[in-house]
Amino acid sequence: MIVAMHGQATEENIQQVIERMVELGFNVHRTTGAAQTILAGVGTPEHFEVAEFKVLSGVYDAYRISSPYKLAGRNFRPEGTTVTFPNGVVVGGKEVVIMAGPCSVESREQILTSAKQVAAAGGRFLRGGAFKPRSSPYSFQGMGLDGLKLLREVSDETGLLVITEVMEISQIELMLPYIDCFQVGARNMQNFNLLRELGHVRKPVLMKRGISATIEEVLLSAEYILSGGNYNLMLCERGIRTYETYTRNTMDISAIPVLKKLTHLPVLGDPSHGVGIRDLVPPMALASVAAGADGLLMEMHPNPDKAMSDGAQSLYPEQLQKLMEQLRLLAPVVNRTIA
Ligand code: PEP
Ligand code: MN
């Protein structure tokens, strides 16, 4: 940590800051300049908040220079993390992995048709919510356990893996037999108790960026899961809230290369929630892959006009097919492959 003192700071102010730094466990190196005194704190005390120093008397500014996320940081595994699934699919390797399906599981017929269409297009995972976090309590809340059973059944039939959202701790055990990957939704990215519990299982987790989360907050949330020992973790950009209202969210494509630089974890893009408008999904999917995404999570519905949730952003099956062809042309440009 670096603490820059004001030009007018008194010797008493400076000593007070030094004492607090020493108390926390820093080794303090003082540089007394003509205009300003700089205090460099070396060491990594377990608990300290840079904000505490910013408001001490005589302090001009204080900065943290070490990363607050130790396990999520790129340095921890410079070669990158790969997450391997039971059928041999690897996320974080050369292949860009496609996960697609409806927003929600609605019926046996709907999810079976979706699975066949996703498999035919070259998808590896079937997505579909069984437990749905809806903005309104009056909207469709998902099929629950019946939805999980249907997901498993139709995925086994079509050779796909299952990814679906977990909303609370009590659902973890219930879901384990039916799924291949837990999805932590944007609304739960800072549900720290849930994250901590997901650190104790070994089943892979895909954690989405919160609707107003900074990249540092994403990485600190990842740290909760990693610190429990679950390294089978993937991150996903899904759009953030900005002042723009034309799109549902603003798909922050730049977050993809930024995260790839800061962390060893695989990074995916979810252009469906990123823009909320079906015809804008293909260009944002292509942009995500061009920006370095290790995979895509996308909504597709056999009949989006009748979907019980997120129909407006769900691709028609033909759109998914066409997008996959475009992705296959693009992938080699960024030295990737696609199924
Ligand atoms: C979803 O994937 O359907 C979903 C609810 O996503 P998010 O958490 O990104 O809103
Ligand atoms: Mn959705």
Image: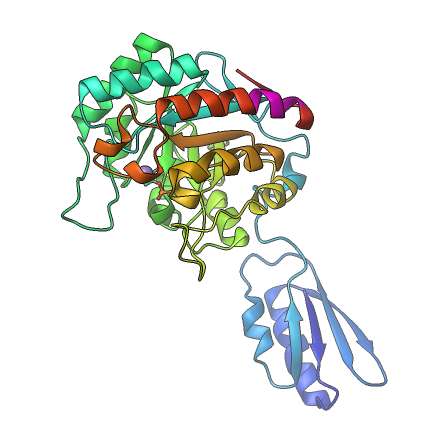
- Dividing the image into four equal quarters, which quarter contains ligand 1? top left
Q: Position of residue 111 (x, y in %)?
A: 25, 21
Whether residue 94 is visible: no
Residue 180 position, x and y percent, is 37, 22
Q: Residue at point 17% right, 30% down? A: 143
Q: Main secondary structure of the magenta part?
A: helix
Q: Quadrant of residue 26?
A: bottom right
For the residue pair 49 and 133, the one nearer the viewer reads as 133
Judging depth in this view, the residue of 246 and 213 nearest the camera is 246
Residue at (42, 24) in percent of width and height: 320
Residue 232 sits above or below residue 312 on the image: above
Which quadrant holds residue 124? top left
Which residue corresponds to the image point at 64% horizontal and 38% vertical from the top-left?
76
Image quarter where the N terminus lies is bottom right
The residue under the point 39% across, 37% down is 278
- Percent across and percent down for residue 61 are 65, 75
How are the residues colored? rainbow
Viewer-side residue, 260 vs 309: 309
Q: Nearer the viewer, residue 295 or 259?
A: 295
Q: Which residues are magenta?
A: 327-332
In reply to whether residue 61 is colored magenta, the answer given is no
Query: In the shown orientation, is residue 116 left or right of residue 62?
Result: left
Magenta span has 329?
Answer: yes
Residue 5 visible: yes
